[in-house]
Image (spheres, rainbow, N blue to C red):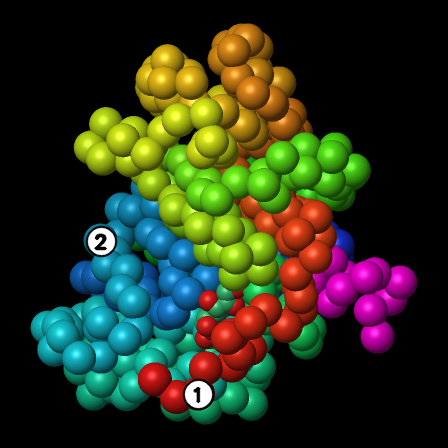
Amino acid sequence: DKAGHKHFMSKEIFEQPTVLAECLTHYSAGERVALPEGALDFAETDRLILVACGTAHYACSVAKYWFEQLAGLPCDVDIASEFRYREPPVSDRATALFVSQSGETADTLAALRYAQGKAARIVSVVNVPESSIARESDLALPILAGIEVGVASTKAFMNQLGVLANLAILAARQRGRIDAAREAELLETLRGLPGLINQALALEERIHKRTGKLAEARSVLFFGRGAMFPLALEGALKLKEISYIHAEGYASGELKHGPIALVDKTVPVIVMAPRDALFDKTVSNMQEVLAREGRVWLITDAEGAEIAGDGVWQTLVMPRIDPIFAPMLYAVPAQLIAYHTALHKGTDVDQPRNLAKSVTVE
Ligand code: F6R
């Protein structure tokens, strides 16, 4: 049942405020992150290893910024198919965390089995609680997104980030990096997200109009800095998957190191950048793109739009949010850009060619 939507993907994008609110309520009681006593001890662990595939891997890559910045916890992120065969050393004090919507992804399950008996603790973040990955973990944390039908993952990504954000806050508290007031403040920011996501969803009509031109492109570049970098990768993946347009995500600082060679007026450049401490650097990156006749689509907040000024091809103004959790909010325009570009192209959004919802063979 698509609940009046044209596609499951659209329904699932619009479910995000509701399912995220449910997830956040589950993982935090009022002012504190709430997990069963003793479920996780991030004070004792020396390293967090995050392993997953595809979109779930990008959720892990966002979370790395949170665990490092908030909790000072060293953090490795790996693609499951690389981790399982590389024979990486795993400390017996490490916490190994596996993220999977289906809980059945073959490479992620094999990576989990590799870490068993090596890491101190095997934790999974899954949408399907009775899945293999959940069953084989010491601790399985449900993301509570409800069934996801669209092959392109949207609400599962959002709720993976919801769980991981709570874990990073818990780690920060257990490692003595934040006090009760800061914990309450971070949780307050998270709780504000469903409302802000609703505001972002209200930009759909605007995004539909502006993606008309994007649908004609042969190649699109996404740029982001900090925790927005993995979101640039996710935006590019979504666009490739359902519109079949070639897209690449880059860290903004990498522009000069290669991708600028691709820039001309036929390659739209989507810059996802809330106004943060490094925004000025992003503006100078954009100027380099503009100087080569690149068409920049800037997604930012009102302050960012003002600083960036004229010259950009188009701007999408997002609500203001603490930059640390901005990847969760900016995931929405990334998803809507992919979805509406696909609508313009008339591709099969819910069943993209060559892709399966659950990848149970490697
Ligand atoms: C992208 C997408 C895939 C999955 C990946 C992992 O939209 O859905 O990249 O994220 O196949 O799947 P799970 O999370 O089931 O392990």
Disc 1, ligand 1: is the CB inside 8 Å? no
Local SS, label 1: loop
Does the rendering let one see residue 61?
yes
Q: Within 10 angstroms of label 2, few (less than 14), some, or many (20 or more) residues?
A: some
Name which quarter of the figure residue 290 lies in: top left
Q: Which residues are magenta?
A: 1-11
Q: Tell me if label 1 and label 2 are in contact, CB under 8 Å.
A: no
159 on left or right of 140: right
How far is mark 1 from mark 2, CA to CA? 30 Å
Q: Residue tagged by mark 2?
A: 74
Query: Relative to residue 156, is residue 237 depicted above or below?
Result: above
In front of the other: 232 or 177: 232
Q: What's the magenta bit mostly, secondary-structure-wise?
A: loop
Nearer to us of marks 1 and 2 is: 1
Picture coordinates of residue 254 (x, y %)? 26, 34
- Labels 1 and 2: the sequence-earlier one: 2
Query: Residue 6 colored magenta?
Result: yes
Residue type beneath disc 2: Pro
